Amino acid sequence: MLQFTGHPFVDVGLAAIAAYGGKNRIADLDAADLDKVAQYIEQNYVLPPLRGHLTMAFTSNAWFAQDAFNPDKPGLSADQRAERKSKRDQWAARHLRQWATSGATAGAESTPPHQEGATAGAEGDDPAGATRSVCVFTGLPAAALELSNKLAPGRIGRAQMPLLQGDEAINFFTGGVPGLPIAPEALLALQFMPMACAKVGVGLLAVHADREHLTLDFARSFLNKNLRDVTSLQAAGEDKFPSAPRALKTLLVEELLQIERHRRNEERRSDQAASITAYNFNNGKDPKLEIYHLPLQITRFLQRVNTPAYLPIWEQIVERAWQRITVRSGKKGAPAAEQTPRFNYLFEDLFTLPQEAPRFVRLYFLRVPRRAPSDEDPRRDYSPYRERDLVSWPLVVLFMKEVMSMDDAHIEQIRILGDKLADYTRRQGGKRFFRQFFTEQKTYNFLNLLTKTNIDYVRFTQGRDVLFDLEGYLAVFMDGTELMRPDWRLARDLVLIRMVEQLKDWIAANPDTLPEEDVQSDQAAEAVPVE
């Protein structure tokens, strides 16, 4: 009866349950899968490192984190330990096992974990009445027992779901009744959801896609790593959960590419791409939420670039975008600990697309270096001359189609112009023309260069051909019939990419064609990505 709900936290939790049970669809979940997850939570959430780590998702009022329910606290008598364990077990059952005991009243007399000493409200006193009976996420019957003394039976607050309000707040709830009604199955999913999140800094990262299979793949990847970390940390007696070695955006793209690679290797690749939204949240003392989005055209590009036609060149471009690590010796001259880069500049810049497509094309596909203040930025050493083998017209065509939504006719006009200019450069225009075409930044001067070159090309072909006719000229460089495109430099860079690919041997034989100082990016210096 369970299915994709559309809510990121619930869906990631359901995906985590499916991954833990070895299922590939949420709809395949059964009672055995729910029981298996409930057992894991009962055994591990009450111990380090999860006991402290998960307070960033459920606050310190969560049933497993309440100090008043900790039977292992020093100085307790045997009776006190037994009483505390009994209370914690009762509240664990309310959060984890109501799906198996619908309508049960066991433990109803106990006090909620974050309201010890208060009197439990009677079900008949619930002002919500009929509204509490249906889960807002799944449409299934809501839980029968209280999860907080200040909320009606079956309703949750901030200690059960990240970023909700306090238990007594009435704002933004239907009818002014605090809390959200939830089914026991959805509640279990929320409890397990953080296990399918990556720890990034002082928050958790939950990844949700508009297609179930991709949400499942992200959940499975993060869950497996977290399960391994819990096992090793418990064995070592550690109580601090490690953060991911990558920065958030880099981690997100790296995981997506690994998922696509894995799916391709297993021959279960789908042509259906999905938009992805990542939620970086903290539900502790300083709750926060930051949302990162990769739209459909970007994820579709990343899916297609991971195919044999593009992968070899793409992997080289990605490899040369990783942060460079400055090796420093340890204390008193000791060898420095091995470090790994935290971010990939190309991955980070994917989140600026498609708005920043002109900058992305010039930097990563044309290899024009960027003025960067940090030695860690490898882009300061890019070179269209030294790295001309990374300039790939087929890869750029894919980018133009998927990311820039450019039609085939427009792309063909750019290709034809690039081929003609490459031929003109090789046989007549030479280094002077190529350098001027590459580096000119003023609109008026560039327009004059095109006009003059078109005339020279007609002479060069003895009137048999023109560099571009009116239709081609308007399509590539003009906005209407009178004004140059505001993004004419992007059009010029796309033409240049085709030219460089056609002239690689000629450029190699003319190393002074592209002096480094002449091809610096016209963009301002860039700061290190914010994590």
Image (cartoon, rainbow, N blue to C red):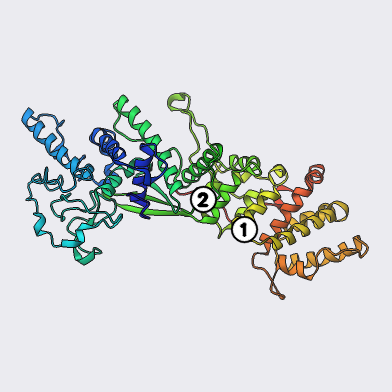
- Residue 71 found in image quarter: top left
Please, is residue 409 above or below residue 222 in the view?
below
Looking at the image, residue 164 sits to the left or right of residue 394; the answer is: left
Q: Along the line of sight, which residue is nearer the eye, 442 or 26?
A: 26
Label 2 sits on residue: 527
Residue type beneath disc 2: Ala
The residue located at (22%, 53%) in the rendering is 142
The residue located at (82%, 52%) in the rendering is 431
| Residue 523 appears in view | no
Kindly give the residue lying farthest to the right in the view shown: 462
**Of circles 2 and 1, which is in front?**
1
Under circle 1, the secondary element is helix
Q: Position of residue 427 (x, y in %)?
A: 88, 53
* Residue 358: mark in rendering: 1
Looking at the image, residue 366 sits to the left or right of residue 188; the answer is: right
Precedes in sequence: disc 2 or disc 1: 1
Q: Position of residue 251 (x, y in %)?
A: 47, 43
| Residue 189 appears in view | yes
Tags 2 and 1 touching, CB below 8 Å: no
Looking at the image, residue 415 sits to the left or right of residue 141; the answer is: right
* Disc 2/disc 1 C-alpha distance (Å): 19 Å
Looking at the image, residue 232 sits to the left or right of residue 389; the answer is: left
Please, is residue 184 above or below residue 446 in the view?
above
Residue type beneath disc 1: Pro
